[in-house]
């Protein structure tokens, strides 16, 4: 039903089919690299045409029309009250590091997080911990049933300047239980970041109650299906943080009236960086427009993916696969506790790699993280896909 929006990628995928396998390629690494909708091709061309026609004056269109339109689309998706508070950057790491740079590193900095965060933030914290005044507390994600209670207990201590947690954990697909609820009652002295990359445009998300309490980061590379290079971070209204990492875009509104010293605005430009390629912005807008025209809300997408996941589980339960089974599946609570991919524990990293190769021979594309094999689900999976080839 929805494959019609992704014909270019689906057709191109067949060129990578395994020799000797007549089955069509089944892309199940969509939580990592989501196929792009066909409308993104015209969007890239439109960006080129605007650059050719307007040259340097294209910034007026980008900042005056395109960025506000994207901000409105993100705000509508997440029920954020102030679109102008949505900052843009090529990746979420740039935005999070800009926030980290707003803390006085001459003073003690205590950070609360989990042991299940994505590599980018995890690596950055390890580097920060080399500084004598930075202390990091990592709450184990497992057992997930008690994660919210354990995280909240530390959060409410008021000892932390920054808290950071994923909406959906990248290694397991498990959604952080009650994350928005505990974010709503966080101490005022603690800034909080929600890494929403594996939840954005996958799980229905309403940030209205925490819009002025948390920073929410995500981007277009995964479930929006618009490619890399367009990420965002929502900024609480009234935020007065002064990032040390700041670029000339932060002065976009005052270039002709620049005064002495470093001034910051009260909208997203407070966390703006510098020159970047805005073709990803055009692609993301094209996908948002397509979904709006077709009535493809996050709720619709989420229900469709959950149906595909149920079909997968039914096929799995009817088989007797030594690895792809309920025992090795980290979590499968599809009602409110899971994202759009399943993660299976393999006996070792080598075993995960071997299973990935075996699935590749069946034209099933997936990915792995060490001993964990991840299988994702998307709009471009056919309704009649049985998934039985994975288990035979």
Image: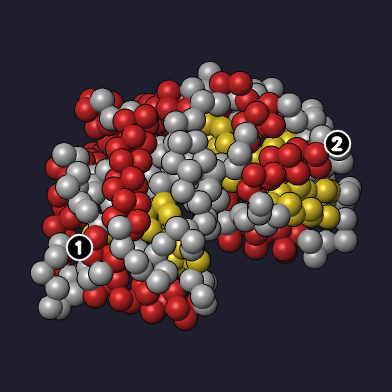
Q: How far from the left and from the top, in percent, is residue 370?
A: 52, 72
- Callout in the foreground (2, 1): 1
How far from the left and from the top, in percent, is residue 54? 28, 37
Callout 1: 10 Å neighbours few (<14), some, many (20+)?
many
Answer left or right for 334 relative to 183.
left
Left or right of 325? Residue 390 is left
The answer to which of 14 and 93 lies nearer the viewer is: 14
Q: Residue at x 36, y 72 (%)?
A: 356
Tag 2 near tag 1, CB within 8 Å: no
Residue 186, image quadrant: top right
- The answer to whether residue 57 shows anywhere in this view is no
Q: Residue at x 33, y 45 (%)?
A: 310
Q: Neighbour class for label 2 at 10 Å: few (<14), some, many (≥20)? A: some
> Where in the figure is residue 348, as x and y percent of width and height?
52, 77
Residue, disc 1: 25
Quarter of the image containing the N terminus?
top left
State the image coordinates of residue 75 (x, y, percent, origin top left): 46, 25
Quadrant assignment, res 39:
top left
Judging depth in this view, the residue of 298 and 81 nearest the camera is 298
**Residue at figure coordinates x 48%, y 63% from the top left:** 328
| 150 to the left or right of 7 | right
Residue 158 badge: 2
As helix, strand or loop, the secondary structure at mark 1 comes to: loop
């Amino acid at each position: 039903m929805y494959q019609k929006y992704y014909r270019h990628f689906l057709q191109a995928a067949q060129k990578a089919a395994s020799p000797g396998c007549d089955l069509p390629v089944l892309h199940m690494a969509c939580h990592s690299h989501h196929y792009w909708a066909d409308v993104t091709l015209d969007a890239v061309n439109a960006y080129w045409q605007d650059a050719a026609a307007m040259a340097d004056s294209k910034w007026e269109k980008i900042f005056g029309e395109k960025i506000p339109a994207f901000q409105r689309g993100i705000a509508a998706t997440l029920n954020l009250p102030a679109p102008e508070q949505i900052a843009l950057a090529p990746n979420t790491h740039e935005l999070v590091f800009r926030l980290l740079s707003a803390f006085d590193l001459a003073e003690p900095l205590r950070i609360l997080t989990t042991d299940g965060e994505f590599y980018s933030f995890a690596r950055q914290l390890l580097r920060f911990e080399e500084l004598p005044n930075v202390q990091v507390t990592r709450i184990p994600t497992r057992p997930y049933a008690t994660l919210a209670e354990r995280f909240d207990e530390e959060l409410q201590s008021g000892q932390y300047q920054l808290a950071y947690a994923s909406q959906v954990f990248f290694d397991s697909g498990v959604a952080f239980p009650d994350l928005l609820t505990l974010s709503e009652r966080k101490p005022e002295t603690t800034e909080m970041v929600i890494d929403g990359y594996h939840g954005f445009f996958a799980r229905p998300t309403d940030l209205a109650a925490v819009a002025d309490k948390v920073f929410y980061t995500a981007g277009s590379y995964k479930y929006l299906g618009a490619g890399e290079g367009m990420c965002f971070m929502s900024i609480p209204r009234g935020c007065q943080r002064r990032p040390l990492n700041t670029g000339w875009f932060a002065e976009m509104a005052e270039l002709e009236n620049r005064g002495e010293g470093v001034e910051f605005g009260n909208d997203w430009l407070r966390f703006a960086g510098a020159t970047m390629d805005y073709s990803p912005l055009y692609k993301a807008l094209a996908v948002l427009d397509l979904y709006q025209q077709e009535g493809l809300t996050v709720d619709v997408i989420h229900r469709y993916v959950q149906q595909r996941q149920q079909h997968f589980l039914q096929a799995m339960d009817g088989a007797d696969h030594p690895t792809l089974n309920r025992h090795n599946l980290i979590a499968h609570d599809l009602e409110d506790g899971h994202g759009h991919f399943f993660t299976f524990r393999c006996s070792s990293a080598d075993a995960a790699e071997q299973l990935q190769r075996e699935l590749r021979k069946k034209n099933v594309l997936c990915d792995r993280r060490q001993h964990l094999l991840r299988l994702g689900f998307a709009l471009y999976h056919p309704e009649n896909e049985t998934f039985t080839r994975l288990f035979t």
